[in-house]
Amino acid sequence: MGRQESSGRQSNVTISEGESHGITINHKMVHLEKIVRERQKTGMLERSVADQIARFAQQISGQAQRNATARVGAGKAVQIETIEVKQPFRSQEAQIRAVEWLRRELFRTHDYYFTPTLDPEDQKRRIDTFVWGREDSHEHLARNQQPSTEDDPLL
């Protein structure tokens, strides 16, 4: 429903003077908007990409020991738990002895795995070994390594 009013005043340079007043009332239907708010999915999906990455990083960093997340090819990533592997050595000293034994065995097999010594005696020994196919002395081993008397380095 609407209402309209108007008024006016007019003056002339004539001797007469006039005044008028008018009111207009209109009854009509007016369209009023009804606003409805609905949630819509946006380009950010249901969770933003940054939130998804942060959640994945938190899941990976918060895993317990022996747990991992793995994906093969383009397949779905799965969480796995590895078996418990016990320490192969009975003590720290046994591990040190085993590493030293392995180092000596590697040196006996292939001395080029280690930094060579350029002493004249070692050069003579290497030349004799290459030319004659024999090694005249094992003094270089005694000088660089202590001979092992252990049968089993893991004990």
Image: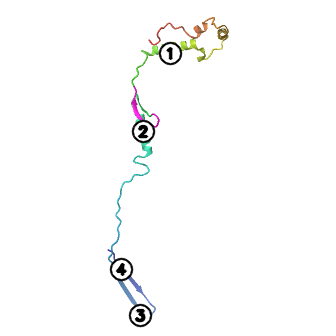
Q: Earlier in the sequence, mark 2 or mark 3?
A: 3
Residue 151: where, in percent of width, then height?
47, 8
Dot 3 and dot 1 residues touching (CB under 8 Å):
no
| Residue 124 included in the magenta stretch of the image | no
Please give the range of residues in magenta: 72-82
Left or right, 127 with reference to 55: right
Outermost residue, top direction?
136
Mark 2 residue element: helix
Specify the amino acid type for callout 2: Phe
Q: Nearer the viewer, mark 2 or mark 3?
A: 2
Specify the amino acid type for callout 4: Glu
Find disc 2 in the rendering and name its residue: 56
Dot 4 and dot 2 residues touching (CB under 8 Å):
no
* Residue name at image x 58 percent, y 9 percent: 141
Find disc 1 in the rendering and name its residue: 99
Name the mark on residue 16.
3
Give the CA separation, mark 4 to mark 2: 68 Å
* Residue name at image x 46 percent, y 15 percent: 95
* Residue name at image x 48 percent, y 14 percent: 98
Residue 140: where, in percent of width, then height?
61, 9
Mark 1 residue element: helix
Name the mark on residue 44.
none
Q: Nearer the viewer, mark 4 or mark 3?
A: 4
Give the CA separation, mark 4 to mark 1: 107 Å
Specify the amino acid type for callout 3: Ser
Find disc 4 in the rendering and name its residue: 5
Residue 131: where, in percent of width, then height?
67, 9
